[in-house]
Image (cartoon, grey):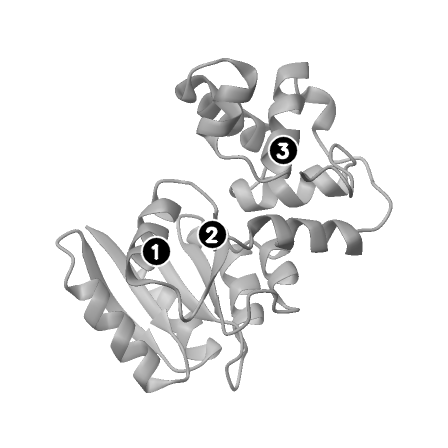
Amino acid sequence: MIRVLLADDQVLVRAGFRALLAAQPDIEVVGEAADGAEALAAVRELRPDVVLMDIRMPVVDGLAATRRITGDERLAAVKVVMLTTFELDEYVFEAIRSGASGFLVKDTEPDELLRAVRAVVAGDALLSPGVTRRLIAEFAARSKEPAAAEGLERLTEREREVMALVGIGLSNEEIARRLVVSPLTAKTHVSRTMVKLGARDRAQLVVLAYECGLVRPGWLG
């Protein structure tokens, strides 16, 4: 059973998400929060698998709450998916840097929301379909000069290659086709790379790929 916490200051948004999620046999909504402070307290008490976290909330915003959650080793198993009204919200970049596993726009299709919850529990980063490449391109445009990522020297040549492909937004299946290997082999390379670099999930691996210079602006097709 996947345990989900809803954090949004809009009652109707929470109610809609709760109705959709609670109808699934493998998902349980364990709590709700109307601001970031409530969300943080609820996460510490309930230890959900996934938090659907609105970026803009009163008292403590979703970004600050996410930093506190992902910065607490005791909450390492908790995944945060940011909710935003705009596909390229200015705070999305910082949210992913802060440890969020991805983001969804609030008007996403119901099936996509369900897929997102299941995906992050499975260890995959989640970015709304259709905006992934724009998000990465925008991040690349804003990124500073590449800096050496701690642990990068421990990666094999194949792991660096895989990390670069993750950085341009490819899925494990797409990486497997590009490298002519099985999806399981691609997934193993991604997992080992995250472990070596201390990346919380795939989303942070994307950020690291740009920050260390493995991927540069203009590489997106």
Residue 21, image x and y in percent?
Answer: 22, 63
Q: Are marks 1 and 3 in contact (CB under 8 Å)?
A: no
First in sequence: mark 1 or mark 3? 1
Residue drawn at point x = 50 percent, y = 54 percent: 102
Residue ID for mark 1 = 112
Dot label at residue 215: none
Q: Residue furthest front?
A: 221
Residue ID for mark 3 = 197
Q: Secondary structure at mark 3?
A: helix
First in sequence: mark 1 or mark 2? 1
Residue 70, image x and y in percent?
Answer: 52, 56
Q: Secondary structure at mark 2?
A: loop
Amino acid found under the numbered disc labelled 2: Pro
Q: Secondary structure at mark 1?
A: helix
Residue 161, image x and y in percent?
Answer: 65, 22
Query: In the picture provided, is 221 more to the left or to the right than 77?
Result: right
* Image depth: mark 1 or mark 3 in front: 1
